[in-house]
Structure formats: C-alpha cells, structure tokens
Image (cartoon, grey):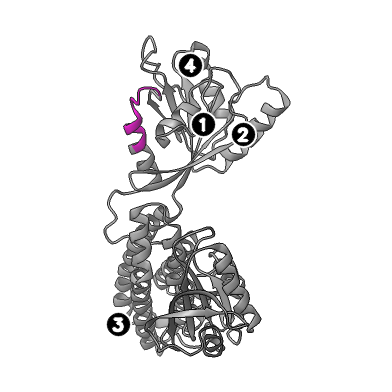
Amino acid sequence: MQGHHGAAAGAAADTIVAIATPPGRGGIGVVRLSGPAVPALARALLGELPPPRSAVARRFRGADGAAIDTGIALYFEAPASFTGEHVLELQGHGGPAVMDLLVERALALGARPARPGEFSSRAFANDKLDLAQAEAVADLIDAGSAAAARAALRSLTGEFSSRVRALDGLLIELRTLLEAAIDFSEEDIDVPGAGRLASRLTALDAEFAALARSAEQGRLLHEGCTLVIAGRPNAGKSSLMNALAGHDAAIVTPIPGTTRDLLRERIDIGGLPVTLIDTAGLREQADAIEAEGMRRARRAIESADRVLYVVDATDAAALAAWPREVAALGPAVPVTVLFNKCDVAAAAPPAPRPAPDTVTALQISALTGAGLEALRAHVRQTAGYLPGDSGTFSARRRHLDALARARAHAVATRELLAARASVELLAEELRLAQRALGEITGEFTSEDLLGRIFASFCIGK
C-alpha cells in the first residue's frame, strides 16, 4: 500500500502536540507529540532524549528550567511508533493547568496544535493502519456497549480488512482468468474458461453477501438505531421512555403538554445501541410553544429508524383514531403501535385495523413493565440485530455502500458474461469492483473523504 496515502501525509513535516486524555481533572494526564522535531523537543522538555520504548521518570521543564511537573516520559523512535514518526508521550498529573502548561511549552518550542484525528491520519499515511483500522480507533473510543467495543477491537486488529482483502484476492484471480480468455474473439466468447468464470462469479457473490451481513451487524453495533416515541398527549410516552431507560429521564405528569422539546437518551437493548427520542404530544389545539415542540417531533419522526406510536388503551377516542393518526405520519418510516396501560384497560384493545404493511402492534404497560421485554425483542428483530457478537467487527455506512457497489459490479460482470459481451467490458467491471473495495481500506480514497473521516475523531487520537 506504500505511496497511496499521500493525501493524508501532507503535514508530516510538522510536529504536532495535543492532550490525549479527556478534559477535566484526573489522576493522570497525557500530552502526546509526533513529528520530526520530537527528539529536539524532548531534550528541551526533559534535559535529554530518553531511551526508546522505555518508561522513565523525568521532570518536565519550562523555558526557565523550572519544573512544570514530574511524571513518566515515553519516547518511540520512528518508524516504530503508532504514527510511524518520532513520538513522545508525557504522562503527568491530570490537572487542566498542568496539561495546558505542557502544551504551551511544546508550542513555544515549535510544535503546532494537532487537528482532530491527526495522530491516526499520520498512522494511516505512514501505512501503520489502513483506513478501516484507523476508523476502528474512533469506534473503540465511542463504543456504547461491551459488544461494540469488542467489534471495534476486531476491526482495529485487522479482521475486517483481512476479509476485504480476501475478496480482493478473489477478484484478482477472476481478472487473471479473464485475461486468459482475452485472446479469443468476441464472436467466440464461449471459451473453455467461461463456465469456470461463471461459477467463480456465483461463488464470489455469496462471499460478498456473507461479508455484507457481517458488516451490517458491525454497523448496528457502531451506529445503533434511533427510536422516536410519538403519540397523543398523556398516552404514556415519557413513562415508556423512563421504563426503557431504567431511570427518570423524562418528567411525567398528568398535565397534557408536559414534554415540549425533544428528549434524547442513549440506551442498550440486548447489546444494540439505541437512541430514544421522546417527543411532544401530537394534537390539533396547542399554544405556540407546544406547536413548535410538535414541529420538532414530526421532523424527528421523518429521520427515525422506527416510530413507537403510543396509544392509551383506556381512551376510546384514541383507540378509534390511531389508524388515521399513524397513516398521517407517512409511509416512509416503519411504525410500531404500542397499546399502553393494558394493565388497567377494561378489555384488550381491538385487533389492529387495516394499516400500511410497515405497522405492527404490541400491548404494553409502561407502569408495570408488562410487554416491555417483547418490545425489546421486537426492536432487535426489526433492526436486524442478531444476539451474540462472535466474529462481528466494527463497520460504518460507507463500508456497506462500498461493498454494495463492489458487489453490483461483480453481478454486472456475470450478467455481461451471460450476454456474451466483450471481454474488455467484463474486465472493466471487475476493475471497478476492486476499486470500490479499495475505498474501505483506503487504497482508493479521495482527500475530501479522508478529511471528513478524520475530522470526526477526537483531538489526541
């Protein structure tokens, strides 16, 4: 892969510095430096260049020679470091003032502040990580569950990349097989290797499908899904949010219109990260503030992965109106209708009336918890999340998009072969499939995409 990461390597002549630990007070704080001037900066900060890859206790010195702090210094000599450059880590006391003084001293010595993700982008530029592995660094930091953390670690150690490269190897074999047929005329496309090529393309499609399924599970672990709780005022929306969150995330009162704005809560449903959004009650008559809340609620509904539409099972008017209200939400978003307060309803609610195919219905009680386990199972099932994370790796939407495009080119190759198209057209489709796969690991990636990816990282990584 050497040489194809030039877009990320443009600032490698600079030496960068950043605080690598979270903001605030802590027992230990880490300042990290990377770049060609690190040895000179280390001598100025520590009085000497520490031996590589050894933790040594040192005083961290200011411009006047007085100690800023005392702690552990770790020096990594290029190329044997995370970034592939000279790297120095100063592990001192985690007070914000101390950390800021160390950064200011490094800046005065000629370093510049690191941009978000710049340490990881330099690791990518220097072929220490491919792009999928670099993204896994951020995914591991942001992991919202133990399963997500394990999946990110698998990607960081190269499991996802190795499967992508295995597919790339199959495409290379196919291109080689195709080259062997290129000597035959277009009129005689039924060459001895054509049948073998067709069977290989069928097997390749199965490999693409298997990797896409695994990547989709990884995407769910990384991104999770968004559930919007909607319904009439006092249907029990906030009570449902509190029951699913396991604590009082939303204020619950018998007064209609208590919830005026969107309330968000991040929860874990059997390993699936879920963002719950509680919304203002939907009704026709409302004051200006409540009307704004309903406008925001409808905007959240439009972007949700699923809407949980709560219906008060003790309210005859609500039971009669819910099909019309759900239909008004539009067909684009899947809806689950929840008949709430089933513990006090005089009778079970009527069977769901005719509605779009995307609508399903469950009976629950946000107060007693009845039906909530079935709801959790329903959320996991409709999201496509499979319990257990054995072999799952972290993935993102862009990875799924690249896989889908690569698979489409492979399918097009098979169709062209069946249509007796020219060998050159078949070879071009396979080349495009390889190029799409290369976007996952960074073999073929635009500067704009790299900028967007690394800008989402935290500073210091």
Mark 3–mark 2 CB contact (< 8 Å) = no
Residue at x 38%, y 9% (from the top left corner): 346
Residue at the top extreme of this rendering = 346
Q: Amino acid at mark 3?
A: Pro
Q: Earlier in the sequence, mark 2 or mark 1?
A: 1
How many marks overall? 4
Give the foreground label among 4 and 3.
Answer: 4
| Along the viewing direction, whichever of 291 and 335 lies nearer the viewer | 291
Which residue is label 4 attached to?
319
Which residue is label 2 attached to?
261
Please state the horizontal and vertical placement of residue 364, each as a whole percent of the image. 38, 24
Q: Secondary structure at mark 4?
A: helix
Which residue is label 1 attached to?
250
Give the foreground label among 3 and 2.
Answer: 2
Q: In screen coordinates, is 171 left or right of 38? A: left
Q: Earlier in the sequence, mark 1 or mark 4?
A: 1
Q: Secondary structure at mark 1?
A: loop
Report if residue 371 lies within the magenta region.
yes
Please state the horizontal and vertical placement of residue 85, each as a whole percent of the image. 49, 86
Magenta region, residue range: 367-376
Cα distance between the residues tagged 2 and 4: 25 Å
Mark 3–mark 1 CB contact (< 8 Å) = no
Cα distance between the residues tagged 1 and 4: 25 Å
Mark 2–mark 4 CB contact (< 8 Å) = no
